[in-house]
Amino acid sequence: MNPITPIMNGMKITLKHMFMKPVTLQYPTERPKVAARFRGLHALNVSHDKAKCVACYLCPTVCPAKCITVEAAEDANHDKYASVYEIDMLRCIFCGYCVEACPVDAVKMTGNFELANYHRQDFIYTKERLLEKK
Amino acid sequence: MGIEILGLPMMYYIAMVAKVLVAFVFVLLTVAYATYAERKIIGHMQVRLGPMRTGWHGLLQPIADGLKLFFKEEIIPSQASTFAFLVAPLIALIPAFITFAVIPFGGIIEVAGYKIPLQIAAYYDTTAGQVYDVNVGVLYILAMSSLGVYGIVLAGWASNSKYSLMGGLRASAQMISYELAAGLSIIAVFMLSGTLSLTKIVELQSGWGGFEWYIVKQPLAAFMFFVCALAEINRTPFDLPEAETELVSGFCTEYSSMKYAMFFMAEYANMVTVCALTVTLFLGGWNGPFTAAMPLLGPLYFIAKVYFLMFVCMWIRATLPRYRYDQLMHLGWKVFIPLALVNIVVTGIIGFFI
């Protein structure tokens, strides 16, 4: 077969691509558009100035990676609440089962995907860090 | 002209040094920015951006790369042959640059009443009223381009590493096979021009607004020379000596720091040289419209043509994958050499009857 034509066709394609708009995202300066249902860092929903979580233990039960630690306690109004609510981000697989399991809509997932840190300890997100930022 | 040294006027020496400096600095800058241009062009051909962060649109990237390589650690393998290992990058680099001595990059310009031909190894004799340059310029270039392979073979052998040795062996086999085809394909040009002096060859291509260019009379030779030249300087698709997938990095596997940078400079300088040579032999050199009225347009046309060919080299690199070793040898020995020989015979027959 004639070997020149395929080469010419290839060169035509590369030349055409040169005038296309590059798909590169200049990451730290340009931000990606995060989808509405993206599963990123968790957050605890707040209602009446406190976390909605009632420490029912459904999320640590359903969690396939066993990354959620909850400890229940009783507050001044004799209501059950989570005195400890920790998520280990090094174990979390971002499956979103905790959000689905929650009966009181207390936990959600945000679009935050930049979770890098310098120390292992910093990957354990405590209740204070998870509380929804206003 | 008052002072004379060895029978030549002082102005001759000043012009010589100025020409060498300007041409050399320009080639060095071109080499540096060829790396940038290559990354940008290939990037855009792959629908990427290429370097963007160092300076405006990454314009300072070559300088940053050079500085970085300069401060890298010099490593000499303990089992390497130290002297050859150190000398090899120089042997690769120097022939790439000195080839430029005979390439004419412009016509004759007049500075302070003294006529200077824009070619490093040339001299305008006022009494004879003509330019003298190296009358075997093309032979000189062929000799220098085959010297370049010594650097690579030496690098491969002195590193005392199997990948480097394989790279060096491939480089020598490839260069020797393709040098034959390249040399044979430009013989057809000499048959038309009747001279080996590059100044004369450019002069012969000056008429008829581009129709006197040898690419019109010798399209096959031009194509074959360009492809063989690509193979000779180890550019893609013939970059087998440094095939990353098979040989880590080929002959420069064991090199680091500035020595590694020198191999890369040699590669790009070779590309500039080969493009300049193709322009000189086939694309009319510095000829173009209005060069007679404005001699400074000559170098501009020359640079534009060379940059166009360099763009073609990068374009080819962005398009074609690497040839297999047996395909390379097949192409060299069974396609290009017979074609070049046929081309010589046909040129001879036509030249005999016209």
Image (cartoon, rainbow, N blue to C red):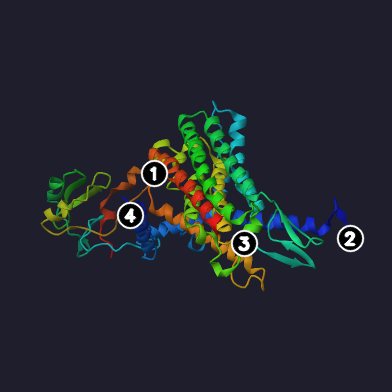
Closest to the observer, A31 or B285: B285
Residue B134 in the image, given as x and y percentages of width and height: 69, 51
Mark 3, Cα crowd under 10 Å, few <14 / some 14-19 / many 20+, is some
Judged from the image, the secondary structure of the residue bearing numbered disc 2 is: loop
Residue B238: quadrant of the picture: top left
Tell me, yes or no, if residue B38 can be seen here. yes
Q: In front: mark 4 or mark 1?
A: 1
Alpha-carbon distance for marks 1 and 3?
37 Å
Task: Please check whether the numbered discs 2 and 3 fall on a single chain.
Answer: yes
- Which mark, by number, is residue B323? 1
Judged from the image, the secondary structure of the residue bearing numbered disc 1 is: loop
Badge 2 is on which residue?
Answer: B2
Closest to the observer, B293 or B188: B188
Alpha-carbon distance for marks 2 and 4?
75 Å
Residue farthest toward the right in the current orientation of the protein: B2
Is B349 on the left or on the right of B294, as rendered?
Answer: left
The amino acid type, in three-letter code, at marker 2 is Gly
Q: In front: mark 2 or mark 4?
A: 2
- Which mark, by number, is residue B245? none
The amino acid type, in three-letter code, at marker 1 is Tyr
Alpha-carbon distance for marks 4 and 3?
66 Å
Badge 3 is on which residue?
Answer: B204
Mark 1, Cα crowd under 10 Å, few <14 / some 14-19 / many 20+, is some
Residue B329: quadrant of the picture: top left
Residue B248 in the image, given as x and y percentages of width and height: 43, 37
Alpha-carbon distance for marks 4 and 1?
43 Å
